[in-house]
Image (cartoon, helix red, strand yellow):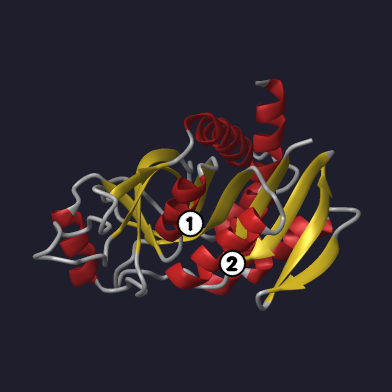
Amino acid sequence: MSRIAIVSAMHEELRALLQAMPDEAPHKLAGREFWVGHLDGHEVVAVLSGIGKVAAATTATVLLTHFGVDRILFTGAAGGLGEGVAVGDVVVAGELLQHDMDASPLFPRHEVPLYGRSRFSSDAKLSDAVQRAATGVLAAASSGESPELPRSHLDEFHIGQPRVHHGLIVSGDRFVSRREESEALRAELPDVLAVEMEGAALAQVCADFGVPFAVVRTVSDRADDSAHVDFNRFIAEVASRYTLAIVRASLAALDAG
């Protein structure tokens, strides 16, 4: 039976997942708790990655070498960068890149030394399942038909019709929260959709091991000084509910082929 890892960036998201796993059992390793159990009949290892690229890489490596997972799904929040990417939207990564990688002049800016590339592609099948799942979850939430996410929660954060986007997510070891930084990233990478701090590192580790992965992010802000959302409340009341619903729907989509 295959085993999938669900990696969350925030405590609230992991808590929601664990509450849905009836037989979760903690295993402490590398300063982390890895919760092994089942979610809707699937073998799952759930873990909090920690913040930043090194933490994400460590987490991914332990999952692959110690727990024998054969797929990884990373979920968390991100800042929106692309045109039309709004708070409450979901971004599914098609590619990931480290926006703070710069070994020039030895290598081109953003290129990972000795890899010959800057972008790492997510697994097409897994990402497609996640994208289809997210589309269904957001449609149900928008129409008020979602049991996990009442329409009132979206209204509270002024979320109208949330959308799913697919494309480039960038990662770096700094929290992007100023307009100047956001504009610089869009100028360097015109197709960028969102920015966060872990996904590209996990992507590189998965590429090293040849293991499929997907990254899905809920947009919590616009990664600039216009952000007005109460971040902790948004994670607890919107993003964590998205996460559980999208993970469950993704697993069902994979079962259905």
| Residue contact at pointers 2 and 1, CB within 8 angstroms | yes
Residue 64 placement: quadrant: bottom right
- State left or right for residue 112 relative to residue 130: left
Q: Is residue 18 above or below residue 178?
A: above
The structure residue drawn at horizontal position 39% and vertical position 51%, both measured from the top left corner, is 86
Q: Secondary structure at mark 1?
A: helix
Cα–Cα gap, marks 2 and 1: 10 Å
The quarter holding residue 141 reads top right
Amino acid type, callout 2? Ser
Q: Give residue 49's mark.
A: 2
Is residue 152 in sight in this rendering? no
Q: Residue furthest bottom?
A: 31
x, y (%) of residue 63?
65, 57
Residue 243 as seen in the image, left or right of residue 110: right
Q: Residues within 10 Å of mark 2 (few under 14, many from 20)?
A: many
User: Which type of secondary structure does the marked residue at label 2 adopt?
Assistant: loop
- For marks 2 and 1 on the same chain, the one whose residue lies earlier in the sequence: 2
Residue 13's place in the image compared with 147, above or below, is below
Q: x, y percentage for residue 16?
A: 74, 59
Q: Is residue 2 left or right of residue 107?
A: right
Picture quarter with the N terminus? top right
Q: Is residue 222 left or right of residue 158?
A: left
| Label placed on residue 202 | 1
